[in-house]
Image (cartoon, helix red, strand yellow):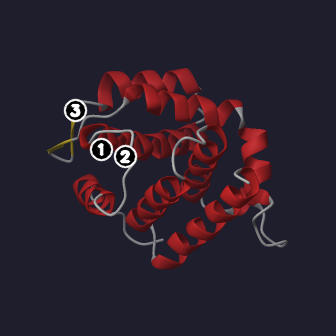
Amino acid sequence: MTEPNSVKAVLEQLAEAEKQRAEPHLSSKQRRARTVSRLAAVQALYQMELAGEGVETVITEFSNFRFDADIEGEALAEADEAYFADIVRGVIESQREIDAAIKARLASNWRLERIDATLRALLRSGAWELIKHPETPREVVIDEYVELAKAFFDDAEARFVNAALDGVARDVRR
């Protein structure tokens, strides 16, 4: 794992990547809000796993204290809070299905439980979107989570996320 980038750097990196792809049914502002929601969902899932907090507690915390607030001295872009909550609740509600889809794409000697908690959160969020939101182009979902992985990790982990989510997409979107 590399030294994490600042939130500002992560958002700039995601904004640049967003220019390369688009969700056709969303405006630029809506796409940006969805990107922020994906980042926040990964952070929330990570926080839940490490701190053992419940889903509604974390969603409320993000809504009350993190969205529309300054982080590291920078204003966080507007989030699609409903989509954020959908991702977090959806991952928790469908975790067995999601984990099975991810495990099916891991090498036989890999266990999901041994993967870094941030990578697990990335994979679970991406797999949830691929499974539960077929209207969102698979390339958009995969690209978003690969870019998030690049913000937190080296290229090897980003390639791992790409391969795993691409495999999940092939399995669930025939």
For the C terminus, the image quarter is bottom right
Among the two numbered marks 2 and 3 on one chain, the one whose residue lies closer to the N terminus:
2
According to the picture, the residue beneath numbered tag 3 turns out to be 69
The residue labelled by disc 1 is: 32
Q: Residues within 10 Å of mark 3 (few under 14, many from 20)?
A: some
Q: Position of residue 82 (x, y in %)?
A: 43, 25
Q: Could you classify mark 1 by the number of other residues whose Cα lies within 10 Å: few (under 14), some (14-19), or many (20 or more)?
A: many
Residue 151 is situated, as x and y percent measured from the top left of the image, at 38, 64
Residue, far bottom = 156
Is label 2 in contact with label 3 (beta carbons under 8 Å)? no
Disc 1 vs disc 3: Cβ atoms closer than 8 Å?
Answer: no
The residue that label 2 is drawn on is: 35
Where residue 79 sits, quadrant-wise, is: top left
The image position of residue 99, as x and y in percent, is 75, 49
As measured in the structure, the alpha-carbon distance from the residue carrying label 1 to the one carrying label 2 is: 5 Å
* Amino acid type shown at disc 1: Arg
Q: Is residue 113 left or right of residue 123?
A: right
**Spatial separation of the CA atoms under disc 1 and disc 3:** 16 Å
Q: How many marks?
A: 3
Q: Amino acid at mark 3?
A: Ala
Q: Residue at x 75, y 64 (%)?
A: 105
The amino acid marked with disc number 2 is Thr
Looking at the rendered image, the disc whose residue lies closer to the viewer, 2 or 3, is 2
Marks 1 and 2 close (CB-CB < 8 Å): yes
Numbered disc in front, either 1 or 3: 1
